[in-house]
Amino acid sequence: MKSKKILIIEDEKSISDIVKFNLTKENFKTDTAYDGHEGLEKALAGDFDLILLDVMLPGIDGFEICKKLRERSAVPIIMLTAKEEEVDKVLGLELGADDYITKPFGLRELIARIKANIRRTAMSDDSPTVSAGARDFANLTIDMDRYEVRKDGQPLELTLREFELLRYLAEREDKVFSREELLEDVWGYEYYGDIRTVDVTVRRLREKLEDDSSNPKYIMTKRGVGYYFRRP
Ligand code: CA
């Protein structure tokens, strides 16, 4: 298999070096950038399978880079955060980051996350062999293959993760899933995720999907258990 290429945007050379060393050992190819401008330039120019993006960078910060990248590319992005405030910002903003990891992080955890995010992208690229096609749920149409969602005929702008969560729930109508189950099945890792990520993604999905996101008709909350999809 062709080795995957990862861009490390991190100004602390000691962190960058050790991440690079360990990724190389795991058979990844790497490139590095040590400030925001260089990072954004390389990210836009190169053909990367994943980007590790530090938040606090000289030049342009990681939040801004993430936003700019998302206008042009769907490459998986893992944000490296140093503080709880940054985590809240990653979760709360429409940045489009796929994941985040808090410093100091273990290298095994980082590599597990990288593999999970790349695997998920690879699966969505060459899936599915059996065409599920477009399915209608009241005034919502979800095209399971083409990653498109329309509401009353109008396309909705969902991130890859929002789409995958919606598809996962809609394909299993009325079945309730816990946050942990969703994290494992939709996000693709078992031990390292933060269940708040699920709540935030549900909230964003509702804002895009529902007429009134505080009174949802599609993505329902089962109190004390989790979430499910209902056909209105
Ligand atoms: Ca930094």
Image: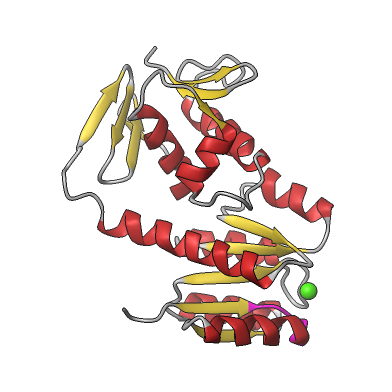
Q: Which residue is drawn at 63% across and 64% down?
A: 109
Range shown magenta: 9-13
* Residue 184 rendering spot, x and y as whole percentages: 51, 44
Residue at 42% across / 77% down in the picture? 4
Could you say which is closer to the camera, residue 53 or residue 95?
A: 53
- For image coordinates 17% across by 42% down, the residue present is 131
Q: Is residue 49 left or right of residue 103?
A: left
Quadrant of the drawing holding the C terminus: top left
x%, y% of residue 90? 69, 52
The one nearer the camera, 162 or 30, is: 30
Left or right: residue 132 compared with residue 224? left
Question: What is the image's colouring?
Answer: secondary structure
Q: Is the magenta stretch mostly helix, strand or loop?
A: loop
State whether residue 220 appears in this view: yes
Q: Can residue 159 be seen in this view?
A: no
In the depicted structure, whether residue 2 falls above or below residue 110: below
- Indicate whether residue 12 is drawn in magenta: yes
Q: In this view, does 204 lie to the left or right of 58?
A: left
Q: Up-down: is 62 above or below 95?
A: below
How far from the left and from the top, in percent, is residue 89? 74, 50
Whole-percent x and y of residue 134? Answer: 22, 34
Where 58 falls versus 80 (above or below)? below
Q: Quadrant of ligand 1?
A: bottom right
Counting the numbered discs, the total is 0
- For the N terminus, give its image quadrant: bottom left
Residue occupying the far left of the picture = 130
Magenta stretch: includes residue 134? no
The residue shown at (68%, 60%) is: 101
